[in-house]
Image (cartoon, rainbow, N blue to C red):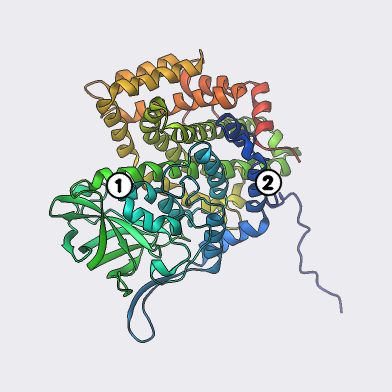
Amino acid sequence: MTQVRRDTHDILNQSPPYEGVDLFVSDRALRDAVEANGAGAEAAALSEFGRRWGTAAMFDAARVANEVTPKLKTFDAKGFRRDEIEFHPAYHAFMAESMRAGLHASTWRDDGSRAGAPAEVARAARYFMVAQVENGHMCPITMTRAGVGALAVEPALLKRLIGKIASRTYDPSFRPWWEKDAITLGMGMTEKQGGTDVRANTTTAMPAADGYAITGHKWFMSAPMCDAFLVLAQAPGGLTCFLMPRFRPDGSVNALHFQRLKDKLGNRSNASSEVEFAEAFAWRVGEEGRGVRRIIEMVQLTRVDCIISSAGMMRMALAQAMHHARHRTVFQKRLADQPMMRTLLADMALEVEGTTALTMRLCHSFDLAARDAQEAARGRLLTPAVKYWICKAAPGFIYEAMECLGGNGYVEETPLARLYREAPVNAIWEGSGNVMCLDVLRALSRDGEAAHAVLSDLVQQCNGLPGAKEAAAFVARTLSGADGEARGRAAVERLALLAAAAALTESAPSVAEAFARTRLLAPRGVTLGTADLSVPEVTMLSERALPAV
């Protein structure tokens, strides 16, 4: 009998998986930005970190953690209320990896004070690499890190918690925080009727024994298996910040009743919940009526992580597109050598050069803020502007990378589909685009002198780059005009691009001129690949983006 061959053809002309890579050494833009912003001594450790996170096993674990999503277990087998979330083991493995690396606490000292330079940049470089692999678990990592900033106003409470917050172990057990080796912090701010307008919150807080009793709801609460949550509620003295533990001081389960888990577009490995509080116990954080002020301390840091995450996802999308193009042949020619594709990939690489340099420079400002008032002002003004630009740019950028892979980019076997779904959350979480623009306007109105000094510094750092002076003048004129709010988006985007050009002069001067010329002087078209780049610039950008193999 003749044997029937079931394979219809040999598989040819497919790019190998992008795995087994050093996410740090293979990224020239990141290496240069880390060096320029004071963390060059971390290079060897960052390379080790990059090799670990660039393995095939890490990429596969990310796939599994997002395919097998969290499940809410409201009651135990005997009918007792538990409100626990069940995760796939891959999620817990990522949490353990990130906490071992200190991504949740490495920017704080043991007493809760800031660690100082180069802690922010060194952490940001690691976070940037993690974002290329799995973003969902970074939600509690981010909130734990940022929560310390809010707790600083309650030294006694922070002293009780900081040792367990700063622990490099991961303890997912569901038990009182004082029995655990390590704890994580979450947050719950928004309610059904208010969203960003937290002053519309209706959840109430009444003084009780050793704390407050909180009754109400939160429309979004992440991540629900954290050990304590920063929440806002209306106390007798006004909107106030509280820390609500999962267990009451007597060891009983606190009255956080999860209604359901959000069915989100992306961020699938992470659980976000709707919750009701039935006289749940909490400690006050700061004075009554000062809740918004306290949350701002936290939000400033969580916004930075949104920026790092989006920049990291853009980097991975670029690497996937370039890797594929170098291994794929189309019309008897490598895809990466086709003129239009070369220009597109170079323009994409230029965008990532700008986002990477700007992200690390912003983190450097946070490193220096405690001893440098100008850097503190720079961080205040630029954080919302940078979040506006980078987080909004990421989804469209990742789509363009997906198109470089054609149909292969549209299926789940590549990371691009997951990255594409993940990207929008960073533009929405911690303030949408319009909110970011309003925050820039507030910074200008409250501290206009310092903000204009930052603008002047950016122009000076650009050192004659094309379009820099004009961009700064446009920003100042537009945001201080009578219609500043209506035209805020154009000015804030321009501000971020100016800051990116300035950052490139410090970390990648060979790239800065092309960036300024195509983003400030004569902005490219609506889509990537439309920038006017010379052949030498295309070659240089491609070589910097990914080492040839």
Residue underneath mark 2: 22
Instruction: Estimate the x, y position of residue 431 in percent, counting from the top left.
Output: 33, 43
Say above or below: 400 vs 382. below
In depth, the one of 392 and 282 nearer the eye is: 282
Task: Tell me where residue 226 sits by quadrant.
Answer: bottom left
User: Mark 1 touching mark 2, by CB under 8 A?
Assistant: no
In depth, the one of 414 and 280 nearer the eye is: 280
Q: Nearer the viewer's eye, disc 1 or disc 2? A: 1
Few, some or many residues within 10 Å of mark 2 (<14, 14–19, 20+): some
Whether residue 239 is visible, yes or no, is yes
Instruction: Estimate the x, y position of residue 331 in percent, counting from the top left.
Output: 72, 39
Residue at (59% x, 50% y) in the render: 409
Q: Amino acid at mark 1?
A: Val
**Mark 1 or mark 2, which has the lower sequence index?**
2
Residue at (71% x, 40% y) in the render: 326
Instruction: Name the residue furthest right.
Output: 1
- Per the model, the C-alpha gap separating discs 1 and 2 is 41 Å
Residue at (59% x, 61% y) in the render: 61
Residue underneath mark 1: 153
